[in-house]
Image (cartoon, rainbow, N blue to C red):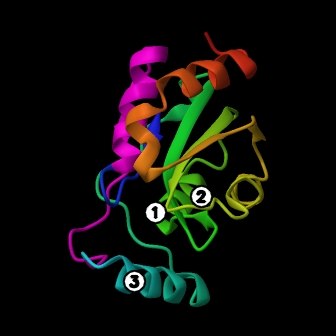
């Protein structure tokens, strides 16, 4: 499992999923000065990164995911799509023959998150994802269990 969490909500969801699946966990990190503490300023920074085709650098080495059959990849929803650190991670693992499983948090609407994720991961097989409001993360365990069962991950 790999996840990026800007506010802590996605990290909480990643923790719940990793406990239910006994997954190895890799936290996607960016340099400390990449984003603001303000969500609106962070949104503007991310939009500029996308417009300039300059995704943020990742801190640390991206793990070799080819040793896994499937990899959960999680992050926050920014403007209805995966956050730019998640997009950078997907780009870094694009040649790995793994099945990707998206999970994400949002502030009320996921928009086109799963479609944008699948497009960014075009070379990989992508299973149905799971998304929840950041406010509902603490109550999502039964929903996560149902989703895992639906996609055949026990």
Q: Is residue 15 magenta?
A: yes
Secondary structure under tag 2 reads helix
Query: Are there few (<14), some (14-19), or many (20+) residues within 10 Å of tag 1?
Result: many
45 to 14, vertically: above or below: below
Q: Residue at x 58, y 27 (%)?
A: 143
The front one of 97 and 74 is 74
Residue 32 at x, y percent in the picture? 21, 69
Is residue 61 something one can see in this rendering?
no
Q: Magenta span covers which residues?
A: 9-36
The front one of 105 and 47 is 105
Q: Quadrant of residue 154?
A: top right
The front one of 60 and 146 is 146
Direction left: furthest residue: 32
Q: Which residue is mark 3?
A: 40
Q: Is residue 123 left or right of residue 73?
A: right
Q: Nearer the viewer, mark 3 or mark 2?
A: 3
Tell me the number on the disc at residue 91: 2
Secondary structure under tag 1 reads helix
Is residue 85 something one can see in this rendering?
yes
Q: Is residue 21 left or right of residue 68?
A: left
Q: Residue at x 51, y 64 (%)?
A: 83
Please tell me which of labels 3 and 1 falls first in the chain.
3
Q: Which residue is mark 1?
A: 85
Count of marks overlaid on the render: 3
Q: Quadrant of residue 7?
A: bottom left
Q: Residue at x 36, y 76 (%)?
A: 39
């Amino acid at each position: 499992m790999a996840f990026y969490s800007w506010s802590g909500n996605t990290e909480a969801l990643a923790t719940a999923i990793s406990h239910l699946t006994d997954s190895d966990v890799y936290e996607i990190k960016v340099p400390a000065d990449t984003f603001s503490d303000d969500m609106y300023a962070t949104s503007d920074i991310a939009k500029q990164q996308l417009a300039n085709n300059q995704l943020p650098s990742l801190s640390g080495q991206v793990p070799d995911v080819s040793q896994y059959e499937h990899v959960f990849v999680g992050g926050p929803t920014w403007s209805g799509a995966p956050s730019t650190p998640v997009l950078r991670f997907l780009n870094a693992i694009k040649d790995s023959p793994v099945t990707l499983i998206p999970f994400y948090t949002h502030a009320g609407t996921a928009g086109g998150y799963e479609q944008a994720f699948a497009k960014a991961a075009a070379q990989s097989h992508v299973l149905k994802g799971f998304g929840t409001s950041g406010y509902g993360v603490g109550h999502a365990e039964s929903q996560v269990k149902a989703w895992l069962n639906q996609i055949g991950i026990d």
